[in-house]
Amino acid sequence: MLRYGRIDIIITKTKEYYSSIEESLLCDCSYCRCYREQVRTEYLEVVEYLDSLGIDIGYYDEIEFGR
C-alpha cells in the first residue's frame, strides 16, 4: 500500500481493476481511440509516474475530456 497525501493506494487492487475492464466497454469514438493509441508514447514521464501508482493512463476514465 502507498500513502499519497490522505489517500491510501493499494497498487495490486488498482491493477486488478484495470485488468478486469473489458475492451468492449471502452469508448470507441475516434478521439478516445487516438488517445489510447498515442498517450503512452507522447507522455512517457507521466505514464511512468502513474504506472508506479498502478494507474493505467490508457483508460479514459482517468482523464475527463469535458464531455
Image (spheres, rainbow, N blue to C red):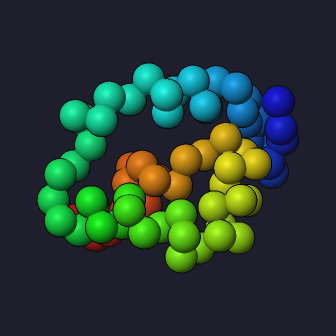
Instruction: Indicate whether 44 appears above or below 5.
Output: below
> In the drawing, does residue 64 fall left or right of residue 62?
left
> In the drawing, does residue 13 fall left or right of residue 56?
right
Please state which of residues 11 and 48 is positioned toward the viewer in this rendering.
48
Number of residue marks: 0
Please state which of residues 42 and 56 is positioned toward the viewer in this rendering.
42
Q: Quadrant of the C terminus?
A: bottom left
Q: Position of residue 13 (x, y in %)?
A: 64, 24
Q: Position of residue 34 (x, y in %)?
A: 30, 67
Please state which of residues 9 and 27 is positioned toward the viewer in this rendering.
27
Q: Residue at x 45, y 53 (%)?
A: 58
Q: Residue at x 27, y 60 (%)?
A: 33
Q: Residue at x 72, y 45 (%)?
A: 53
- Residue at the limit of the structure toward the left, as seen here: 29
> In the drawing, does residue 45 fall left or right of residue 33?
right
Q: Residue at x 83, y 38 (%)?
A: 2
Q: Position of residue 51 (x, y in %)?
A: 68, 49
Instruction: Indicate whether 34 appears above or below 6.
Output: below
Q: Position of residue 23 (x, y in %)?
A: 30, 35
Q: Quadrant of the N terminus?
A: top right
The image quarter containing residue 22 is top left
> In the drawing, does residue 10 fall left or right of residue 2?
left
